[in-house]
Amino acid sequence: MVHKLPTGSSSSFYLHLYQIVDDSSSDQIISWSKSNNNSFVVWDLKKLRSDILSKHSSVLGRNLTEFIAKLRSHGFPSVAKGPGELEFSHDDFARSPLMKKMMVKALSERIEKFDAQIKAMKCKAQSQESYPQS
């Protein structure tokens, strides 16, 4: 299977979600599924709301309902799980060294693009300061 990242504004959602799911410090709250490399499990809904969604609300949603709606709109169907736990899967969202490398590359490219925009704005501001308009 070929893994490819979506482009455009939705790539931000996938990048944030991947970073959170792949972060071992949040494994008690959300982590990769132990049985499937293409899914993740939300283990603690309360802590997801208080510790994760509160910090990433602009990308992941302000509450659990918005988070689930965003997951579904990005192609993550829910998988049957026990009470108080949610599991979501996506064929192109996988725990693998290749996917991690792709995510890091995509994030690096976004940072480089952002840095270039800042540099261009600084140059423009400096040139306007050097040549005041009458």
Image (spheres, rainbow, N blue to C red):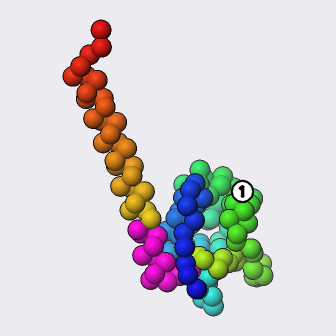
Number of callouts: 1
Residue 112 occupies quadrant:
bottom left
Residue 117 occupies quadrant:
top left
Q: Which residue is mark 1?
A: 66
Along the line of sight, which residue is nearer the eye, 29 or 15?
A: 15
The kind of residue on which mark 1 rests is Glu
Residue 8 screen position, x and y as percent: 56, 56
- Provide the major secondary structure of the magenta segment: helix
Residue 66 screen position, x and y as percent: 72, 56
Residue 71 occupies quadrant:
bottom right
Q: Which residues are magenta?
A: 94-105
Residue at left 35%, top 42%? Answer: 118
Image position of 128 with respect to 76: above or below: above
Image position of 33 with respect to 30: above or below: below
Residue at left 44%, top 65%? Answer: 106
Left/right of residue 107 with respect to residue 46 in the rendered view: left
Residue 90 screen position, x and y as percent: 66, 76
Image position of 21 with respect to 96: above or below: above
In the picture, which quadrant includes the C terminus? top left
